[in-house]
Structures are given as C-alpha cells and as structure tokens.
Image: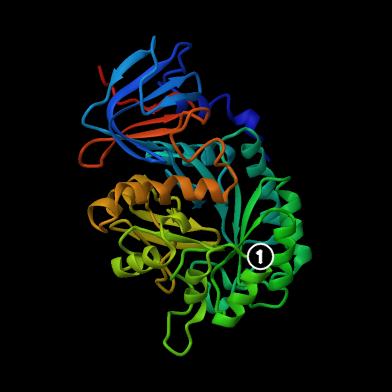
Amino acid sequence: MATPSGARGSAYKRLRRGARPATTHPRVLTGARVVLPTGTVPDGSVTIDGTRIAAAGTPQATAQVIDVRDHWLIPGFIDIHNHGGGGASFTSGTVDEVLKGIHTHRLHGTTTLVASTVTGDMDFLAQRAGLLSELAEQGEIAGIHFEGPFISPCRKGAHSEELLRDPDPAEVRKLIDAARGKAKMVTLATELPGGIDSVRLLAEHGVIAAIGHTDATYEQTVEAIEAGATVATHLFNAMPTLGHRAPGPIAALLEDERVTVELINDGTHLHPASLQLAFHHAGADRVAFITDAMDAAGFGDGRYMLGPLEVEVADGVARLVEGGSIAGSTLTLDRAFKRAVTLDGLSVEDAVTALSATPARLLGMDDTVGSLEPGKDADLVLLDADFDLKGVMRRGEWVVDPQLG
C-alpha cells in the first residue's frame, strides 16, 4: 500500500502548483461584507498573519491591503460527510487519487473535510482506515467517517447488501483501532442487534455515533440518543418517513437538542419544505450541510463505482445502475451555500453557521476553524454579490486566487 508521504512528492505537488505561499508579513482583506460570529460587518476586514487570522472586523495597521469590496468574506466550509470528488474515491482510491479528491473540494471552498467510506469487507475497511489516518496525521483531512457496514438492509441505499452486518461492538472497535485516533464518526442503524452497545462504545472513545440508514421507530431512536448518539446521517434520506401515528426517527432526531442533523442541499435529496422543517425545529446551530459527494463531484457525468456498486451520473444526479437508488451526490458546498441563500430563503448568517460553525463544533475543532476570529486558521471563502465563489484561502494560502489588485 502506498503511503501519503511518498505520494506528496509528485501528484500532490502538481495539485498545489500555482498556490501562492503564505507571506511573512500581514495582509488585510478589506471592504467586504464580513460574516463574524456576532453578525455581518458591512465594510469589514480580516487580517491574515502567516497561517492565522490576526484580526477580524477592523483592519490591522502596517499590513498589505487587498481590496475586496462588493464581496462577501465568510469562513471556509467544513464537510463532515464526503466520499470523494474529481473522479476519485476516498473508499478505493490510491493516495494520489484521494489527494486529488480533497483538492477538488478545496477548489469549491471546503477547507476542512472528513473522508467517508462506504460499506465494504471489514479487513478492507480497516486497511482504508490505515491509509486515511495517515492523511489525517498529515493534516489533509480532519478524520474518517465510516458509513456502513453497520446499517439496515431495509434502508441500504447505495450500499452492497451482502456486505452489511449487525453493529457488533467488537467489530466497531476494530475500525476505531485501525483509524489510530482519527475516526470521527460511525453511521449505524442503532435498532439492529448490538446497536445500542456500539453507540455507548463510540461515545466512550470520543467518536460520533450517527443514526442513519435506519429502520428504527421513534422509541428506538430515543433510546439510541440517550445512549450517546448525536448526529442524524442525511436526515430524511434512508430512514422511515414522518408519520402521524408512527413518527419514526425523524421526529426524535429533530426534537432533541443534543442531535445535529445533516442535510444534503442539492435540490435532489430534499424538497425545500423538508429543509425548512429541519431549520424550523433544529435551527442553524443544529444543522450541518454536507455533500455526501461521490467521485463525480467536480468531475462530470458518466459511469463510476461506489464501493462494489456501479453508478450512473446523468445531469449531475448519481443513481445506482441496478435499482436506480440515489447514490450519494455530485454536490460541492459552494453550490449548497448559494442554493441556501438564493432559493431556500436562509439568511447568509444561518447558512454560514450550517456550513462552518456547526460542523466545526461537532468535530471539536471550533478552537481552530469554523469562524473568522483572531487566532484561528486563515480559512476563508470569498464570494461575489451573486454568491458565486471567487476565492478560497486555506491556512493563509490561496487555493483559488481571486486575482484582485
């Protein structure tokens, strides 16, 4: 198996070619509408010193001034559920391919990313965990999310049914150990045998237990939340619908303040009214926009593999060749943001919270990312007045250089 350190010599340098290195003197981006935790500053500034934010809201003296008037300046996006992009899979790609997928999403504003796997053989997933954990140690990803194999065959979505298994705590522990401290989240159908014990195990080890691809009842979902589950994997999708006599998992997940709900805002996975329902009951502080992206994100239509299953992407929508189930998305978070504020009626501040602050807090990284505050990483996105992406900075380096004067 190739190692990340070996890969960084060739493909990684090619991916990063043209990125402007962080300067040794402060730079101030000024004149933009700057979205801070306290609100939006109409004519604000952010000062960058090396890889960190030195000041936000007002300019710092003796800094190189970069005029970004008529733009929005917001924190870099954080994606906690992402299977790949740029033609590359986080589940099966080589290290070079994984780095390409990461870079693809950085070009669309995602400066912090958790790499998600799909259902596979346990030994294979443990091997992938080892590869991905090295990238996490390098700082390329924020950690690993295991989506499957501990999910319900009734709600399998784009997962191979013959590889599904009940969430045996010993096997869950095997994946955690293989990730060498870099496992961030495991999606489980907690109603299956071993589900509740596995939730407790994950909570004890500081790993997020996410309820998803589940056929649980309302009562079973409440039990899982009480045991320590704190995330709803792509709420509404791959779970029973909300019923008036059988409210199912959706009601339990929305009503509990301990739960953060993932939403895929691509116009395919959710009706706009479902998104509004989630924001009404959970609020931006409990919503995390995700991509659930697969290889085709940022790449194009065609045939792809998602784990062992073949996927056809047509007009940007990914579906299994056999059966036609939706198979992840081709979404990037800049598109999710623009849709939220231009079509869904969300405020810019709420969209920023759902794309940056909420996932940062969920991952336990809000001391370094998730908002434009002094001392945090200089991760930011520059948008024009129409909310189209114009610049991306990660740790003080332009990934997408806005080429402003």
Q: Position of residue 153 (x, y in %)?
A: 57, 77
Q: Is residue 394 visible?
A: yes
* Residue at (55% x, 53% y) in the render: 116
Which of 362/7 is in front?
A: 362
Circle 1: residue type: Gly
Residue most toward the right?
A: 170
Q: Quadrant of the N terminus?
A: top right
Taking 226 as reference, is 82 left or right?
A: left
Residue most toward the front?
A: 38
Residue most toward the top?
A: 62
Q: Is residue 313 above or below residue 277?
A: above
Q: Quadrant of the C terminus?
A: top left
* Residue at (57% x, 37% y) in the render: 367
Q: Position of residue 18 (x, y in %)?
A: 40, 21
Q: Position of residue 131 (x, y in %)?
A: 66, 43
Q: Position of residue 141 (x, y in %)?
A: 56, 40
- Number of dots carrying numbers: 1
Q: Is residue 231 above or below residue 216?
A: above
Mark 1 neighbour density, 10 Å: few (under 14) some (14–19) many (20 or more): many
Q: Looking at the rendering, which quadrant does residue 143 occupy?
A: top right
Q: Secondary structure at mark 1?
A: loop
Taking 167 as reference, is 403 left or right?
A: left
* Residue at (21% x, 31% y) in the render: 70
Q: Which residue is mark 1?
A: 228
Q: Is residue 164 visible?
A: no
